[in-house]
Image: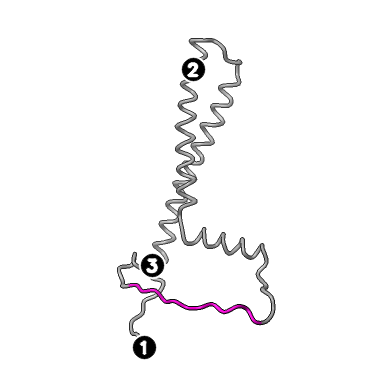
Amino acid sequence: MSDLGFQTSIVKFHQNKRELGKTKYNLFKMFNLAYNGLSSLTVKPLRFLLFIGLLSTFVSIMWAIYVLYAKFVTGGIVPGWASIVLSIWFFSSIQLVALGLIGEYLSNIFFDVKKRPRFIIENEVE
């Protein structure tokens, strides 16, 4: 792993076709494997959640400015609708931001607790 500071190399191998039987890994097990890979090896879904929360917070603030402009300048707003929708959108986006931040903290704790490299090869056998 280059991120650990050790030398890395590539090991090439040839995968033969299955000679006997059929795989026991069904679709559910494949999705479970993919989910475990995403949840234990990367924090990108958590960062995406944080990004979506920040983006929707920005959009809800821009929309609030537009609604205030439309209410006081043009007067063409249905009473009560804008305040309900804006409050739901704004507070939902704040919850997404909070979940993203909590996820970042938990992922940092998780990776700090592991504190182990995947592989370290000390000697090579020829």
Residue nearest the observer in this picture, 10 or 60 = 10
Judged by depth in the image, the label closer to the viewer, 3 or 2, is 2
Q: CA distance from mark 3 to mark 2?
A: 51 Å
Residue 119 at x, y = what percent?
Answer: 40, 75
Magenta span dominant secondary structure: loop
**Residue at 56% in and 31% down:** 88
The foreground one among 94 and 23 is 23
The image shows residue 126 at horizontal and vertical percentages of 36, 89
Amino acid of disc 3: Lys
Amino acid residing under circle 2: Leu
Quarter of the image where one finds residue 33: bottom right
Residue 26 in which image quadrant: bottom right
Q: Earlier in the sequence, mark 2 or mark 1?
A: 2
Indicate which disc residue 125 carries: 1
Distance of label 1 from label 3 (alpha carbons): 27 Å
User: What are the residue bounds of the magenta stretch?
Assistant: 8-19
* Residue that appears at 45% across and 42% down: 51
* 15 within the magenta span: yes
